[in-house]
Amino acid sequence: MRLLFDHNLSPRLVQHLADVFPDASHVALIGLERATDEQVWLYARAQGCTIVTKDADFNDLSVLHGFPPKVIWLRIGNCTTREIAAVLRRHHTTILAFEADPAAGTLALLRA
């Protein structure tokens, strides 16, 4: 699974989650630090990535254009990078099932 972390998430998540999501990357690490949401969307689709974001805009793009790419929408409010990593770890099995489901385009994750 190739996760692509959006601008609004820390690039440190790549290191924090390398053991469970070894193919993860961040937009800043691949030269998309100034890219628009649409450009990130197109890159993720072309590269087979699932976008991880706290931004509703990617959910809106999914509704508008369909998928791929798939979107993991973190609806967890303000929190630290470690807290975000903990949420993703806690939902690891759910994320894998989401990735395998051909009918699912967006997965909303909550903190609890």
Image (cartoon, grey):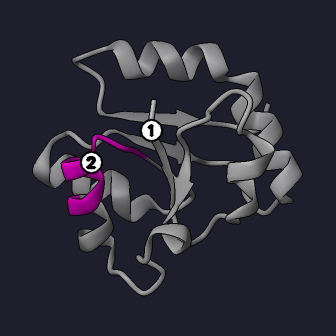
Is there CB contact under 8 Å for labels 2 and 1? yes
* Residue 96 sits above or below residue 61 on the image: above
The residue tagged with tag 1: helix, strand or loop?
loop
| Extent of the magenta region | 42-50
Residue indicated by mark 2: 47
Q: Residue furthest bottom?
A: 34
Q: Residue at x 51, y 46 (%)?
A: 73
Label 2 packing within 10 angstroms: few (<14), some (14-19), many (20+): few
- Residue 31 at what x, y percent from top left? 43, 77
Residue indicated by mark 1: 2
In the displayed structure image, the side of residue 74 where residue 13 appears, left or right: right
The amino acid on which the numbered mark 1 sits, given as a three-letter code, is Arg
- Residue 62 at what x, y percent from top left? 24, 48
In the displayed structure image, the side of residue 3 where residue 20 appears, left or right: right
Q: How many marks?
A: 2
The residue tagged with tag 2: helix, strand or loop?
helix
* Residue 36 sits above or below residue 14 on the image: below
